[in-house]
Image: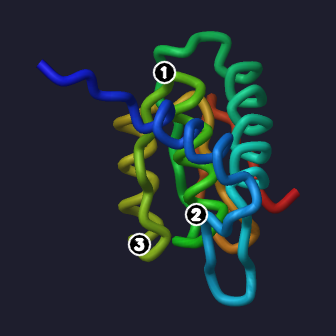
Amino acid sequence: MENFDTIIAQFNKIAKSFPSVIAIKHGNLQLTYHEVDTQSNLLAYKLLGIAKNEQTYVGVCVERNCKAVIALLAILKAGMAYIPFDPSFPSARIAYMLEQSRPVVVLTDNTTHDLVVLNGCSKLNLDT
């Protein structure tokens, strides 16, 4: 039987081997493996500080860009699961999904921050 690494283990190997290689490119923004690793580690620690329990759900309501990749990587590094909330959904649909899933925190950005309206859950704006 073959030994398979997790996504995080694979990413860490690549980030250590090729830190200055471009990992993500979106529009005019490009980030190296080192930058993605550093930013996702910081966010993972922040999530663990908010959640206090790694067996929890984190909502993600961001546009599809570099921030989304960093957010998903951070959630996996923290040992958590994510619930995607598509910003193109009607606000009533997002509200219903939030009510049903009850994530401990929802990651947003400047364009999606106002779409997420919920009680008993915190929001973390990735742009601030």
Q: Badge 3, how many Cα within 10 Å: few under 14, some, many 20+?
A: few
Above or below 23: residue 14: above
- The residue beneath circle 1 is 56
- Residue 112 in percent (x, y) is at 63, 67
Seen from the viewer's position, the closer of residues 30 and 43 is 30
Q: Secondary structure at mark 2?
A: loop
Q: Earlier in the sequence, mark 2 or mark 1?
A: 1
Residue 82 in which image quadrant: top left
For the point 76% across and 60% down, which residue is it? Answer: 20
Q: Which mark is residue 70?
A: none
Above or below 115: residue 97: above
Q: Earlier in the sequence, mark 1 or mark 3?
A: 1
Q: Is residue 101 left or right of residue 75?
A: left
- The residue beneath circle 2 is 62
- Residue 96 in percent (x, y) is at 37, 50
Q: Amino acid at mark 2?
A: Val
Q: Which mark is residue 90?
A: 3
Q: Are marks 2 and 1 in contact (CB under 8 Å)?
A: no
- Residue 50 in percent (x, y) is at 73, 23
Q: Are marks 1 and 3 in contact (CB under 8 Å)?
A: no
Residue placed furthest toward the front? 17
Where, quadrant-wise, is the C terminus in this rendering? bottom right
